Amino acid sequence: MLAAALLTIAVVFFAMNMGGSNMTPAFAAVYGAKLIKHRQAVVWFTLFVALGGLLLGYNVVRTLGGGIIPAGYMTLNVVLLIILSSSIGLFIANLLKVPESTSWTTVFAISGVGLALGHLNYSIYLKIAPFWIGLPLISFALTYFLYKKIYPPRQENLYLYQAFLSHKSKVKSLAIFSSFYIAFAAGTNNVANAVGPLAGAGLISPIFGLLIVGPLFGLGGLVLGKKIMKTVGEEIVPLGLISASLVSLVTASLLVIASALGIPQSLVQLQALSVMAIGSVKHENHIVSQAASRRIFLAWAITPVLAFSLAYGLTKIFLRI
């Protein structure tokens, strides 16, 4: 009974931390442009995350629920250690006010437990690793190619700028739509980080898990999301609405593809490489040397390793392996 209560608390805490982290790539641009208020962003974020999880989250649930550790070894105590380790890693990133890869953190936590148990499915990394490497590179290359078509202004693309200036309201609508699309894509992939281990242990059905965990992301966005959005929107060079929309459309599409294939994929890293592509076209490569960017990269390096180490150590201590 105690373990079940602790697991419930851990899942709520984990989902809230993921919501706080995921709300930034979805709404930082339109929030920074004052097109939407924080509470409005929370409502839309909750709706589209839940919708994405229900419509396209099952394949990632299956990967995390039995692809890394065989489902037969997913017990209540094992799931508790996975969720707890992942939550601590993400919470530290949120304390630093930086968006973190929830998928990386979860996969590393599951891997730490699996290694300690001696039941880690190494072959799954042959499926995951190429996407972890390839999709961020595609995000950079695709954004660079598309943005190069519209920037800098020149004779052959002046008609685009005339269209943008003549339809400012439509540009704003596109930016808001792209924010909804990012939230939907996050739901297709990241809700499974909490639901996958629970479903693998048979503690909850995948659909019911996706239904109840999705709204918890919105609660995290309400409590934690504002400060992280402020970090990204103000401390890092803000994007214009057109470039922000392009970044969102590229990264959300790549994440949806990953979700359909059952790949737990990092949204914030896809977006980071896309933003870097914008900076490269504009010759603003100094973006990555800013203090806020360095803090983000440091968190990306430390958090998954911390989650892995915690999961491995806690499994050895509490499960007496």
Image: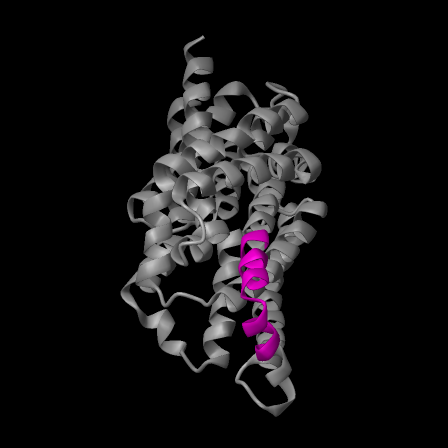
Q: Does residue 104 belong to the magenta stretch?
A: no
Of all residues, the one furthest to the front in this rendering is: 166
| Numbered circles on residues, count | 0
Of 308 and 15, the residue lying toward us = 15
Q: Which residues are drawn in magenta?
A: 161-177
Identify which residue is drawn at 32% across, 55% down. 231
Residue under the point 58% across and 55% down: 178
- Outermost residue toward the bottom in this view: 155
Q: In which quarter of the image is the N terminus?
A: top left
Q: Which of 14 and 63 is in front in this view?
A: 14
Percent of width and height locating residue 149: 62, 80
Name the residue: 47% across, 34% down.
Answer: 218
Classified by dominant secondary structure, the portion drawn in magenta counts as: helix
State whether residue 51 is above or below residue 280: above
Q: Give the side of residue 10 with respect to residue 60, left or right.
A: left
Q: Is 55 on the left-hand or right-hand side of 84?
A: right
Relative height, residue 115 to residue 128 (above, below): above
Magenta region includes residue 170 = yes
* Viewer-side residue, 79 vs 30: 30
